[in-house]
């Protein structure tokens, strides 16, 4: 019965189209035919569904056909084409698809310092060329990895190249992920750029040790900027807002841009996310020996206190200052090997030992800032393998760096609270939307 109804509807549609062809002028009946066939298809979407008969009225309207307008190619003519650079492409194979047959142009691209950046075009990026009737290159345009628009133009004297800042637009993107093995693994699954992942770790570095504190099932939501040139993404910008589930707690951070151009991250209530100290002196590492009052020393073969934390990492891994301060010692010190000691505000000091190398400018009396690289992991002094020994002291007392309550940074001034609340409102909405989108990357608004 259903099949019979479908045949009847199709026959009616064909009859309607035939009558329309007889009624309308040539070139005007196609749209009506499409609508008639679409009506038959629409009814077929739900077989057996009872539908009320609706009275209809046939309306015929004559539409003017669009005129054909020749493209203005300029006084010198030429042909514009655009192609996307493909994986495995060479400049020659891309030129072949674009219809460019110009050995002189290829030679210029190989020898000109600015034009050579065409060889660093990433797959998926567009390249636009203009050629003459013989396939000779007149103009080549593309956006390089820095977001600059490069042009190679032929004139009466040969080729010339120039770079100019391209107009950039910024849009928000939203990503959501769940920790299964590591932060970077979850970020890759969510399509998050590495630069954004590092920012995410840095934003929460005062509260989370991203090796020691992460648990399977932890999750994150992040809103970040993506820069576009000519509609093409050229690289990520700043993290605008982020939310991290770590165990039973949920941490949230929002970017605040002050009128003077300074930037900082605060919680929703204006508390500083950037504490006076980072939780760890390395972004990603592994704790091999914790803070203990009694640990068997592998070299001295005796039980003694271990008043710090050992982080295993390959030789050459960067070590950063956990807080801003002044260098009180930088050099070799017996069992510590190459060591740096920093004096911070108040009663706090930190120590970094067994370094393979100390950054040259880091010497006694120099000032360093939080997060600045001051040395590199090594195996100097009394060490059985490459690692960093890190100590955190309050006055003369050594504290466990993994559990000590770190002093907070300065909160957002009260005068900025209203503007801050208004600025972060759209980002709060995006984070709320992202909570149900684990492993998803979405484009948001401008």
Image (cartoon, rainbow, N blue to C red):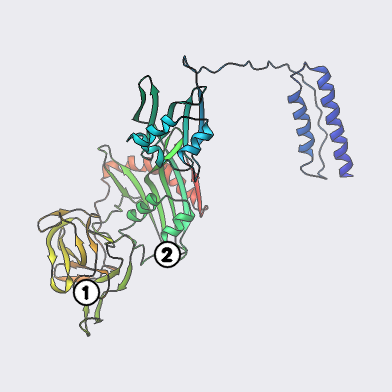
Q: Residue at x 42, y 44 (%)?
A: 427
Q: Give x and y (percent) for residue 115.
A: 36, 34
Q: Give x and y (percent) for residue 221.
A: 44, 52
- Compare residues 325 and 436 and report the one nearer the observer: 325
Tell whether 143 sits left or right of 288: right
Q: Residue at x 81, y 22 (%)?
A: 20
Tell whether 280 sits left or right of 45: left
Tell whether 305 sits left or right of 84: left
Q: Earlier in the sequence, mark 2 or mark 1?
A: 2
- In this rendering, the answer to whether 218 lies above or below 17 is below
Q: Which residue is mark 2?
A: 248
Circle 2 Cα neighbour tier, 10 Å, few/some/many (<14 / 14–19 / ≥20): few
Q: Which residue is mark 1?
A: 307
Residues at badges 2 and 1 in contact (C-beta under 8 Å)? no
Q: Is residue 226 visible?
A: no
Count of labels shown?
A: 2
- Compare residues 107 and 379 and report the one nearer the observer: 107
Secondary structure under tag 2 reads: loop
- In this rendering, the answer to whether 25 lies above or below 48 is above
Q: CA distance from mark 2 to mark 1?
A: 29 Å
Secondary structure under tag 1 reads: loop
- Compare residues 49 and 226 and report the one nearer the observer: 226
Circle 1 Cα neighbour tier, 10 Å, few/some/many (<14 / 14–19 / ≥20): many
Quadrant location, the C terminus: top left
- Compare residues 343 and 65 and report the one nearer the observer: 65
In which image quadrant can residue 389 be found? bottom left
In which image quadrant can residue 325 be found? bottom left
- In this rendering, the answer to whether 168 lies above or below 71 is below
Q: Give x and y (percent) for residue 143.
A: 41, 35
Q: Residue at x 75, y 29 (%)?
A: 35
Q: Give x and y (percent) for residue 413.
A: 25, 45
Which is in the foreground here, disc 2 or disc 1? Answer: 1
């Amino acid at each position: 019965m259903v099949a019979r109804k479908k045949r009847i509807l199709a026959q009616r549609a064909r009859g309607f189209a035939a009558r329309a062809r007889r009624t309308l002028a040539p070139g005007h009946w196609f749209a009506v035919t499409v609508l008639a066939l679409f009506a038959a298809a629409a009814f077929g979407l739900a077989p057996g569904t009872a539908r009320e008969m609706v009275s209809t009225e046939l309306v015929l309207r004559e539409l003017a056909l669009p005129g054909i307008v020749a493209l203005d190619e300029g006084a010198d003519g030429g042909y514009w084409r655009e192609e996307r650079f493909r994986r495995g492409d060479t400049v020659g194979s891309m030129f072949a698809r674009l219809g460019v047959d110009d050995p002189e142009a290829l030679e210029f691209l190989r020898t000109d310092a600015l034009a050579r950046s065409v060889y660093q075009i990433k797959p998926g990026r567009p390249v636009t060329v203009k050629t003459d009737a013989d396939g000779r290159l007149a103009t080549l345009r593309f956006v390089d990895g820095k977001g600059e628009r490069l042009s190679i133009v032929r004139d009466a004297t040969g080729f010339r190249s120039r770079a100019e800042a391209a107009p950039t637009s910024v849009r928000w993107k939203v990503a959501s992920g769940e920790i299964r093995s590591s932060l970077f693994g979850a970020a890759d699954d969510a399509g998050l750029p590495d630069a954004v992942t590092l920012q995410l770790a840095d934003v929460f570095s005062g509260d989370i040790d991203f090796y020691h504190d992460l648990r399977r099932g932890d999750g994150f939501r992040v809103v970040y900027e993506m820069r576009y040139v000519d509609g093409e993404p050229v690289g990520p910008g700043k993290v605008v807002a982020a939310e991290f589930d770590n165990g039973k707690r949920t941490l949230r951070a929002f970017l605040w841009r002050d009128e003077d151009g300074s930037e900082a991250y605060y919680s929703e209530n204006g508390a500083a996310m950037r504490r006076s100290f980072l939780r760890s002196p390395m972004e990603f590492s592994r704790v091999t020996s914790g803070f203990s009052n009694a640990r068997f020393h592998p070299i001295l073969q005796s039980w003694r206190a271990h008043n710090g934390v050992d982080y295993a990492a390959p030789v050459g891994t960067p070590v950063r200052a956990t807080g801003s301060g002044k260098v009180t010692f930088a050099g070799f010190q017996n069992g510590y090997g190459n060591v740096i000691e920093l004096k911070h505000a108040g009663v706090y000091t930190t120590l970094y030992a067994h370094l393979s190398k100390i950054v040259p400018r880091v010497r006694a009396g120099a000032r360093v800032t939080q997060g600045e690289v001051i040395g590199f992991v090594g195996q100097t002094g009394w060490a059985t393998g490459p690692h960093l020994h890190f100590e955190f002291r309050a006055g003369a007392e050594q504290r466990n760096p993994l559990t000590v309550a770190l002093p907070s940074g300065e909160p957002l001034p009260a005068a900025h609270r209203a503007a801050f609340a208004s600025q972060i409102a759209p980002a709060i909405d995006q984070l709320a939307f992202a909570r149900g989108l684990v492993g998803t990357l979405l484009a948001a608004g401008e």
